[in-house]
Image: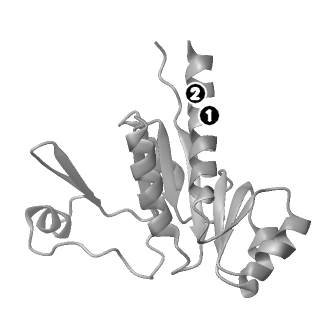
Amino acid sequence: MALVKPVIFQVVGYQNSGKTTFVLKLIQTLSKQGFKTVTIKHHGHGGKPEVVEQKDSSRHIMAGAAASIVEGDGSLLLQANVSEAYIEDQIRLMEVFNPDVILIEGHKNKSYPKVLFLRNSDEFSLLSKLKNIKFVITWDKEILFRGQELLKVPIFHIEDENSLLHVVKDLMEEVHKRKNRSK
């Protein structure tokens, strides 16, 4: 059987909009349904992500290694120093694990299918700046009503659990389509 390309789906929005909470729920729901999911997270807080100092992998990197993998009891941790970590390279790296779904938290300007989180009307301009928005989840009821008029995608309030169900259903359908095409 041929390898099936994973479904790539983004969860985007500004800091503290609910992205991580939603990604965790997506992972849990997809896993319960038997879908293998991997994630890529953009560290959008400035600077490098925190690493445990003085561990062997960090010491290897500090000594000049370009990358270091630590393996133990079925778990792998990768740390690498790269001049630019292109999302496409990260996707290829994650494809090694043969996932059904690759969830990307962040990288909002990429054109993969995505759910956009909007906290308030000040962020409404993202609707015209970003590509391939499939769903919108908002904290602001005004956006909920204004968006319904402007967009052709489902819009949900942050408290509406149906948002998760719609996204999961969409991802599962896309995974099944790809698997059926590869047979």
Residue drawn at 56 percent across, 55 percent down: 164
Q: Is residue 90 visible?
A: yes
Going by the image, does 88 lie left or right of 59? right
Whether the residues at callouts 2 and 1 have beta carbons within 8 Å, the answer is yes
Residue drawn at 40 percent across, 47 percent down: 38
Tell me the kind of residue under disc 2. His
User: Which residue lies under the disc numbered 1?
Assistant: 173
Residue 21 in the image: state x and y as whole percent: 45, 68
Q: Residue furthest bottom?
A: 122
Tell me the kind of residue under disc 1. Glu
Residue drawn at 28 percent across, 76 percent down: 50
Q: Residue furthest right?
A: 149
Going by the image, does 103 lie left or right of 63? right
Q: Is residue 42 visible?
A: no
User: Which residue lies under the disc numbered 2?
Assistant: 176
Quarter of the view holding residue 178: top right
Per the model, the C-alpha gap separating discs 2 and 1 is 5 Å
Quarter of the view holding residue 171: top right
